[in-house]
Amino acid sequence: MSLAEECLAVALESNPLPGWDLERQYAFHPTRRWTFDFAFPSVRLAVEVEGARHRTYKGHRDDCEKMNAAVAMGWRILRFPSDLSRLAPEWADQVREVLCSVCSPSPPSTSNE
């Protein structure tokens, strides 16, 4: 686990939302060995911290395949750069904001009929 992942884990675990189901290294695909760095399976929200592997052409291509498969399966993915681990508290706030927007009821639709 990278420093950025550890920093994000600490930031996320320091102020969890009630009822959230944070899992680390979550295997999301039924046949591939793909994992998310962090996942909230109940709302299909994934968090990825991009490391050096993604700086190669093959790493980037493989990551695109993984992310596209995840989106096709209904996942939403937040991605953060590993070289900015000092921003982990801000990333955790962003994760919480997304989780709150997913878990809150939708506003009633307005109709002009």
Image: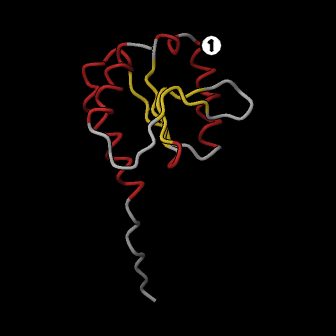
Disc 1 residue type (three-letter): Lys
- Give residue 15's position: percent from left, percent from top: 27, 38
Return the x and y of residue 67 as percentages of the image width and height: 58, 32
- Given residues 96 and 77, the one toward you in this image is 96
Whether residue 23 is situated above or below residue 106 in the rendered picture: above
Q: Residue drawn 36% across and 26% down?
A: 9
Q: Where does residue 57 sit, x and y in percent of width and height?
A: 59, 12
Badge 1: residue crowd in 10 Å (few <14, some 14–19, many ≥20)? few
Secondary structure state at the residue bearing disc 1: helix
Q: Residue furthest front?
A: 19
Quarter that holds the N terminus: top left
| Above or below, 46 relative to 52 | below
Quarter assignment of residue 70 = top right
Residue at point 29%, 26% (across, down): 88
The residue where tag 1 is placed is 58
Residue 60 position in % (x across, y down)? 57, 19
Task: Report the number of numbered marks.
Answer: 1
Q: How is the image coloured?
A: secondary structure
Is 92 above or below relative to 103? above
Q: Residue at x 50, y 49 (%)?
A: 43
Residue extending farthest bottom: 113
Image quarter for residue 82? top left
Which of the 4 quarters of the picture holds residue 90? top left
- Residue toward you, 91 or 56: 91
